[in-house]
Amino acid sequence: HQPARFLTLLLYLNEGMEGGETSFPRWANAETFHSLKVKPEAGKAVLFYSQLPDGNLDDFSQHAAEPVKVGEKWLINLWIWDPINE
């Protein structure tokens, strides 16, 4: 019973940088298998679940912060953890 992040909320605080996207490389839909990249913009938020309804981890929620090439990236992340069952 190892605790895991259940939900993540990313809140972007600034914009105007080059690079810095949040990438979801395993994201897929009926049209493409290319990674989904979210461009940071002030006031924008991204919400995603790390677990499936049955409690297993969702491989499609794998994400990464792409490198910032010019400027700075500021964000707040809020992690909601799955409660530990004792």
Image (tube, grey):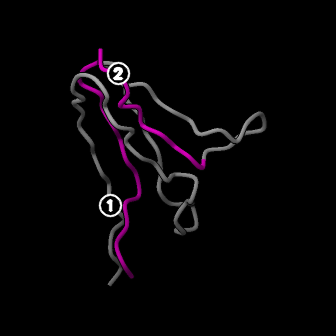
Describe residue 54's horizontal placement relative to residue 68 as left or right. Answer: right
Q: What stretch is highlighted in magenta?
A: 1-26
Return the x and y of residue 70 as percentages of the image width and height.
Answer: 27, 23
**Which amino acid type corresponds to the residue marked 2 in the rendered image?**
Glu
Q: In this view, does 43 lie above or below 83?
A: above
Tag 1 secondary structure:
strand
Disc 1/disc 2 C-alpha distance (Å): 32 Å
Query: Which residue is drawn at the image coordinates 34% and 72% (left, top)?
Result: 3
Q: Is residue 22 magenta?
A: yes
- Sequence-wise, the earlier of marks 1 and 2 is 2
Q: Nearer the viewer, mark 1 or mark 2?
A: 2
**Mark 1 sits on what residue?**
81
Give the image quarter of residue 52.
bottom right
Return the x and y of residue 38 as percentages of the image width and height.
Answer: 46, 30
Tag 2 secondary structure:
strand
**Residue 18 numbered mark, or none:** 2
Question: For the C terminus, which image quadrant?
Answer: bottom left
